[in-house]
Structures are given as C-alpha cells and as structure tokens.
C-alpha cells in the first residue's frame, strides 16, 4: 500500500512539475508576442450640432452718406454732382449702410432714401456648419494571460468538518484550465483530485 501511495504521489508531483515548466515556457512565448502591439479598434462618430437662435437686426439710421441719384435710374449714383451732364436730372439722396456680424451669419443692408425709399437691398454670408463634434472611441481587444494559481478549500457538512484542501490551478489564456487538489484533513490517507475545464462564454 505504501509503495502504491508513493507511486501516486510521484505521478502527481511530475504532473505538477510539468504544469509549472509549461507555464514558464508559455510566459516566455507570451512576452515575445506581447511585444508586438495589438492594433486597437477605433470608432469615429461625427455629429453636427445646430444652435437655433433668433437675433433682432436693427438698421442704424443716424449715419448716412449724401449721394446724387439719377431721377430715371436709381442705379446711377454719384458721390459728387456731375458738372458735365444736366444737373436737374439728379436729385440729392441719402444712403444708409449697416452690417450685422454673427457667429453663424453676416448680414449687409443698403437703403437709398430721398423723402421715400428709392432702393433697398439685404445680402448675407452664411457660415455653416455651426459646430462639428468628433468623438473617437478607442477600444483595445481583450487579452487573456496564462497563469498558475495556488488555492485552498475548507468546508464540510453538518456532521463533520472534513475538507481542508490545498491545490494548484493552471489557466491557459482564459481558454481552458487544469487543476490539482489534495485533501489534508487526514494526513495518513490524503485524497488527490485532478480537474479540467474550458471557458463557456467570452
């Protein structure tokens, strides 16, 4: 019986040593492969934000420029009364100009007045888009490393406290594992347990 138990213990000891050697070898391989950086998964989301805003545009009526406008053609304007042509064909008028500067738009106004409104123009320069927000999300792939773990168990049932265990577990990059556990509650006749497992969900 003693020779049989010694043979079992030697076999388990060789299994444990083989797991440790395999773990050290796999760690060396993993360090060489981990030196190569994994390319991250980059997600880029672009969104245009519009800000609705109402502004009141008040045309200034205090400053003006005196000009001379042809009676029959309001597009013919002179800052100085022409001397060579018929002066009676021109009338004296006022030009009011104003500009509204905004983050979104520039508005230009033009009004030609001689007692009454002779000409009026409104032009604008639109600045779009208002704002562009770029969001970059960098996600690195999950990596699992191999490892050798030492664990213990303690327990029993209501009539006896009969489980004091010590064990080793080797986890291969989160894919599969092997374990060895021995019950030390009875030192004369300890029990030995070997287990294997695989990962079911990622």
Image (cartoon, rainbow, N blue to C red):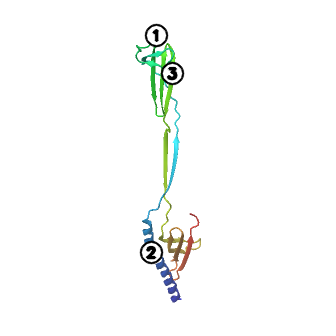
Q: CA distance from mark 2 to mark 1?
A: 107 Å
Residue 202's label in the rendered image is none
Q: Is residue 56 visible to us here?
A: no
Contact between marks 1 and 3 (CB within 8 A): the answer is: no
Give the crowd class for mark 3: few <14, some 14-19, many >=20 residues within 10 Å: few
Residue 88's label in the rendered image is 1
Give coordinates of residue 136: x percent, y percent.
Answer: 48, 50
Q: CA distance from mark 1 to mark 3?
A: 24 Å
Which residue is drawn at the image coordinates 52% and 48% (left, top)?
Answer: 45
Helix, strand or loop at label 1? It is helix
Give the crowd class for mark 2: few <14, some 14-19, many >=20 residues within 10 Å: few
Q: Is residue 49 visible to us here?
A: yes
Number of numbered discs on residues: 3
Residue receiving disc 2: 25
Name the front one of labels 2 and 1.
1
Residue in the foreground of this view, choosing between 191 and 81: 81
Residue in the foreground of this view, choosing between 74 and 7: 74
Residue receiving disc 3: 120
Q: Is the residue 41 above or below the residue 179 in the image? A: above
Give coordinates of residue 191: x percent, y percent.
Answer: 54, 79
Name the front one of labels 3 and 2.
3
Image quadrant where residue 36 sits: bottom left
């Amino acid at each position: 019986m003693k020779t049989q138990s010694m043979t079992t213990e030697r076999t388990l000891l060789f299994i444990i040593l083989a797991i440790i050697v395999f773990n050290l070898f796999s760690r060396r391989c993993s360090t060489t492969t981990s030196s190569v950086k994994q390319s991250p998964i980059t997600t880029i989301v672009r969104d245009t934000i519009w800000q609705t805003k109402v502004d009141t545009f008040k045309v200034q009526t205090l400053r003006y420029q005196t000009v001379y406008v042809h009676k029959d053609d309001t597009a013919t304007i002179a800052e100085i009364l022409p001397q060579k042509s018929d002066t009676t064909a021109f009338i004296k008028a006022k030009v009011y100009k104003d500009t509204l500067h905004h983050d979104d738009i520039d508005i230009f106004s033009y009004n030609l007045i001689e007692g009454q409104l002779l000409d009026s123009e409104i032009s604008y320069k639109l600045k779009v888009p208002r704002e562009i927000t770029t969001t970059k999300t960098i996600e690195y792939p999950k990596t699992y490393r191999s490892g050798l773990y030492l664990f213990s168990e303690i327990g029993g049932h209501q009539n006896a406290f009969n489980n004091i265990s010590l064990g080793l577990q080797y986890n291969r990059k989160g894919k599969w594992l092997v374990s060895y556990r021995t019950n030390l509650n009875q030192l004369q006749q300890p029990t030995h347990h070997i287990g294997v497992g695989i990962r079911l969900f990622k």
